[in-house]
Amino acid sequence: MPEEEYKQLVTDAVTELRSLFKSSPHLFLTEEDVRCFLFQLLIKRTGFGKYENGSLTSPVHSEVRWYGKEQNMHKRSDIVVLDVTDLRVTSEGFPLPSKGFGFNNFYAAIEIKLRRQGGECDNVWLRKLQKDLDTLRSLKTAVSNRYVPLLMLIAFDRKKNIAPKIALLQQEIPTFYESIIEG
């Protein structure tokens, strides 16, 4: 599947997830629920790919750790859609990173945050969102000379509508904010 098609599938899945949160916010009790729903929506759209030995693999993965060329990034993304033709899970030819797999190309990296009704105060939550945006910016910088992946932050808020404050965070990384509180 071409890269742009993968990016469109991711965009469509995120649109559906946002709609689900707005219509049925109680489906999402934890941040992991949001991640699982998005993962399921992405798998439904992307299907499975074939690894070089013929076994099935998926382009969608969660909790992917990034090291970077100099092995100094030490970041983690909630969901990554990668190029399965570039995936390595055996150390034939050269050693794998300590995580046990490697790839050079990915189509999308997504960070997810959910603030519960009794969750953090605005400033603490905004700092967490900023940290995720910084992770995505680091990824963008690390691959900018090779390709342009789809990078995004999804922030669902069950406590309070702070859309104006979220807008101040948004720069070059798309941030999709939804609140169940009108505001």
Image (spheres, rainbow, N blue to C red):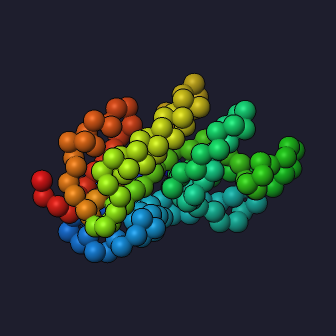
Image quadrant of residue 71?
top right
> Residue 27 at x, y = what percent?
31, 75
Identified at 76% across, 56% down, the residue is 100
> Looking at the picture, does residue 91 appear above or below residue 70?
below
Q: Is residue 143 above or below residue 180?
A: above
Between 149 and 57, the one lying in front of the other is 149
Let me know if residue 8 appears in the view. no
Image side of residue 94 versus residue 2, left or right: right
**Left or right relative to 124: residue 43:** right
Residue lying furthest right: 93
User: Which residue corresponds to the image point at 54% horizontal and 29% vertical from the top-left?
Assistant: 141
Q: Residue furthest left?
A: 183
Q: Is residue 156 left or right of residue 49?
A: left
**Against 108, is 141 above or below?**
above
Left/right of residue 10 with respect to residue 61 in the rendered view: left
Foreground residue, 51 or 87? Answer: 87
Q: Quadrant of residue 114?
A: bottom left
| Residue 82, horizontal then vertical, whole percent | 57, 49
Q: Is residue 163 visible?
A: yes
Q: Position of residue 128 (x, y in %)?
A: 43, 48
Residue sitting at x 41%, y 41%:
130
Q: Position of residue 47 (x, y in %)?
A: 51, 64
